[in-house]
């Protein structure tokens, strides 16, 4: 079986599939109960694969950012419009990768098998979601 960074290929495929499912599960197209299924691989992944999960989830759920092109309606010249939209979309994915990877690193460091850590992890995730929802994006 193929190995990438000392992990089997299925490890990375699970991260990609879980993240894609999480992204599709969000509105306007999705079915929010699918998020429970998308979260299953996240708990067993390492921080790097969890970061991949987060990036994939945000890139799929924020695909509407690409639909902003062309941005001439806000005064952006046409040659810069698509690169700007792609950079914004990729930046959101990188931020998500850092946040989810950091969250998973912290949970792994504290001991994910203990119930108080699981409760803390859920509360932390929820608080960060609330803070992000109050932000500009």
Image (tube, grey):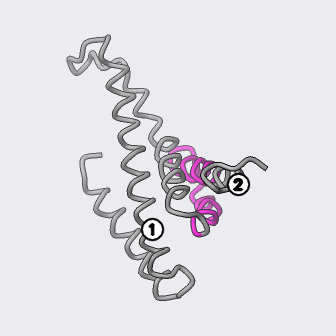
Give the main secondary structure of the magenta stretch: helix
Query: In the displayed structure, does residue 120 sit left or right of residue 76?
Result: right
Residue displayed at 37% across by 43% down = 92
Q: Which residue lies furthest to the left in this view?
A: 75
Q: Residues within 10 Å of mark 1 (few under 14, many from 20)?
A: some
Q: How crowded is mark 2: few (under 14 residues within 10 Å), some or many (20 or more)?
A: few
Residue displayed at 36% across by 27% down = 85
Locate residue 105, reporting x and y percent: 45, 68
Query: In the displayed structure, does residue 24 sit left or right of residue 81?
Result: right
124 and 75: which one is in front? 124
The span shown in magenta is: 16-43
The quadrant where residue 99 appears: bottom left
Q: Which residue lies furthest to the right in this view?
A: 1
Residue indicated by mark 2: 8
The image shows a total of numbered marks equal to 2
Viewer-side label of 2, 1: 2
127, above or below 133, in the image: below
Residue displayed at 61% across by 48% down = 16
Locate residue 15, reporting x and y percent: 61, 54
Q: Earlier in the sequence, mark 2 or mark 1?
A: 2
Q: Residue 17: say if magenta.
A: yes
22, above or below 122, in the image: above
| Label placed on residue 105 | 1
Q: Residue 38: say if magenta.
A: yes
Locate residue 107, reporting x and y percent: 46, 74
């Amino acid at each position: 079986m193929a190995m990438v960074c000392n992990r089997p290929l299925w490890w990375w495929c699970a991260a990609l599939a879980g993240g894609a499912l999480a992204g599709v599960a969000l509105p306007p197209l999705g079915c929010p109960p699918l998020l429970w299924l998308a979260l299953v691989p996240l708990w067993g992944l390492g921080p790097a694969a969890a970061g991949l999960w987060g990036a994939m989830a945000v890139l799929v759920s924020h695909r509407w950012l690409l639909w902003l092109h062309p941005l001439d309606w806000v005064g952006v010249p046409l040659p810069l419009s698509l690169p700007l939209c792609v950079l914004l979309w990729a930046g959101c994915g990188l931020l998500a990768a850092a946040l989810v990877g950091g969250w998973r690193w912290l949970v792994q460091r504290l001991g994910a098998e203990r119930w108080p850590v699981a409760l803390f992890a859920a509360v932390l995730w929820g608080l960060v979601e609330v803070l992000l929802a109050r932000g500009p994006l």
